[in-house]
Amino acid sequence: MTTVKYSVPNISCMHCVHTIQTEVADVAGVKAVKADAPTKAVEITFDAPATEDKIKALLAEINYPVAGLAL
């Protein structure tokens, strides 16, 4: 199991959080998604067949591109 935390600057409200959590949770292999508006971060725990590339591509597709890893 892998956990990553991304910086996603486009998160601005709870609607953004809900959209990210709903969309990313639908990716096969994703076990947990936690988006946070104040820190503009998304923490995702996943196993195969999910990959970081698939997750980042989905986030970009729904207008929440990853800026990098969050601290």
Image (cartoon, helix red, strand yellow):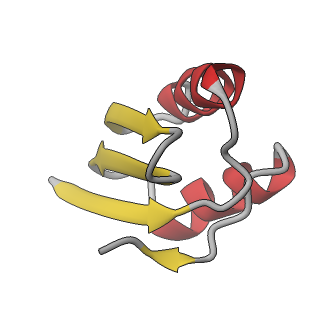
Q: Identify the residue shown where x is 82% and y is 43%.
A: 62
Side of 32 where 62 appears, left or right: right
Note whether 49 is above or below 29 in the view shown. Answer: below
Q: Residue 18: x percent and y percent? A: 60, 20
Q: Residue furthest bottom?
A: 68
Residue 17 in view here: yes
Q: Residue 38: x percent and y percent? A: 48, 43
Q: Tally the numbered discs.
A: 0
Q: Quadrant of residue 57?
A: bottom right
Note whether 51 is above or below 48 in the view shown. Answer: below
- Closest to the observer: 38 or 69? 38
Note whether 4 is above or below 47 in the view shown. Answer: below
Image quarter hosting the C terminus: bottom left
Q: Residue 11: x percent and y percent? A: 66, 45
Q: Identify the residue shown where x is 73% and y is 63%.
A: 65
- Closest to the observer: 7 or 45? 7
Residue 49 in view here: no
Q: Residue furthest front?
A: 38
Q: Residue 49: x percent and y percent? A: 41, 50
Q: Identify the residue shown where x is 55% and y is 25%.
A: 26
Q: Identify the residue shown where x is 74% and y is 53%.
A: 10
Side of 14 where 34 appears, left or right: left
Side of 64 where 33 appears, left or right: left
Side of 69 where 58 appears, left or right: right
